[in-house]
Image: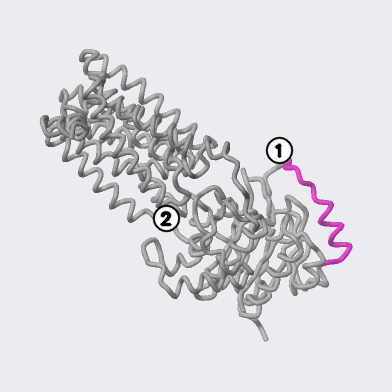
Amino acid sequence: MTQATAIQLHDLTLGYDRHPAVHHLDGYFEVGSLTAIIGPNGAGKSTLLKALAGTLQPLSGSVAMPEQDMRVAYLPQSADIDRDFPISVEDLVGMGLWRKTGPFGTISKQDRLAIAQALDSVGLAGFEHRMVGTLSGGQMQRVLFARLMLQDAAIILIDEPFAAIDTKTVQDLMQLVQQWHSEGRTILAVLHDMGLVAKFFPDCLMIAREPVAWGKTSEVLTEAHLAKARAMIEAHDPHADYCERAA
Amino acid sequence: MMVITTLYDLTISPFVEFAFMRRALVGAIALSLGAGPIGVFLMLRRMSLVGDAMAHAILPGAALGYLIAGLSLGFMTAGGLIAGFVVALLAGLVTRITVLKEDAALASFYLISLAGGVVLVSLRGSNVDLLHVLFGSVLALDDPTLLLLAATATISLAALAVLYRPLVLECVDPLFLRTVSQSGSATHLGFLALVVLNLVAGFHALGTLLSVGLMMLPAFAARFWSTTIEGMIGCATGIGISSSAIGIIVSYHLSTPTGPTIILTAGVMYLISLLIGLKNGLLLRLIPRKHFAA
């Protein structure tokens, strides 16, 4: 059985100042796949998610989503949210309904119920009227997952969601990710915890600027691949020649 | 009875007696209605000094209008609006396509604009005219100016109602707004346009520099009375209106210039709020209070 393609990458090169952070990446994510994206710091993982979320223009190559109605929900690394802003948890989570409400639509009783349910499923029932400024780091991450849930997107991109988060919260949120997976959503998560990757993620993409390995997690997480990823040179070469690799 | 009569003489009778006092009050209230909420958003977006920068940027436009047509409401308003929009747009462009951040981009253009404005004003006209542009003339509001102030308040409140949700989202989580909607830049520009509009309307009453005061000081004061946006907007508007009324009366009795007295009153309100505000006011820190069990 061949699965439909959710995201197709054609010779994708991403970067800043024309220096590549992701170099000539080719491949695809199947609909309903659950993929961990791993690699050392500076390997281009976050850059890749930015491009998939549409907030970064590729230097060359392209990203395609061939299926109909493939909306993307994106949770960036330590989302740059102004935590001092006087907004309630309910209003922040409610932003996830933007597609439905738009800039003017009312938040109906039903919507409030949906917000309450989303909060309940991340273990924060009754937090609706708390101000976001009063939340702990872990609670904030739970709130953002609730918002992600309300976005009800076919493709979900999460960037290092478990940095500085305790084990209990990681467990709870991982359960949510698995639930989304069982609902047939396509999920890409940038992670550093190899134990978590091996346990929960069927597929894995290892990059170190260049793609290192991509496929079944058990085949990607090998000592040889890890060694190759670690050998990546982080610094840009300011005197680098232009890349002549054929597209 | 004596007390009531005295109170009446002090607060009400100046307005009953003099039309220019009533006009000043109505104009200042109209300004407070629009400037209050805008000030709150400027503060929450850490753009408190942007109002100041924009006020400086407006000056050359108003001066150019003055050079062409003298003290003409239409020309000075149009000039101010154009100068303000041009600076906002240029700053936005430079922020987007170069390494300069918004504060630097805005500062660069308002400085150019301000210097140009001063040169223009000095090309013609006396210092009295310059004083009018800088500090306004709230006691000399004619019908067209009052209409302009009222129209500005109306447009501002209607536009804020439309922009409200994207504006809040743009403040809290701009990246999120960018992933769900293309309206981020439009919202930002629309908001800056409202800032310019209110400052231009304000300069007829309070002058280019002081009109920022009625925008920002009530917003800062409101921060000490409420923790929600809605509450802050309500407080800021209320503080703006009462500062206007008190300022006009005080200036009448003490024969001080009215515009600056209004802003000084707002300043006093801010200092009082800072001290005794129920939300993180300074005095609250001195009172030992029991903490909650959970």
Residue to which mark 2 is pinned: B166
Q: Which residues are magenta?
A: A221-239
Q: Magenta stretch containing residue A233, yes or no? A: yes
Please give the name of the residue rendered at 79% of the width and 47% of the height, measured from the top-left corner: A233
State which chain disc 2 sits on.
B
- The residue closer to the viewer here, B76 or B257, is B257
Q: Locate the C terminus of chain B by quadrant.
A: bottom right
* Looking at the image, residue B17 lies above or below residue A202: above
In the picture, residue A210 is in which quadrant?
bottom right
Would you say residue A11 is visible in this rendering?
Answer: no
Please give the name of the residue rendered at 33% of the width and 51% of the height, measured from the top-left corner: B160
Q: Magenta stretch containing residue A1, yes or no? A: no
Image location of residue A132, percent across then percent down? 56, 55
- Would you say the residues marked 2 and 1 are in contact, meaning their CB atoms lie under 8 Å apart? no
Residue A238: mark in rendering: 1
Residue A67: mark in rendering: none
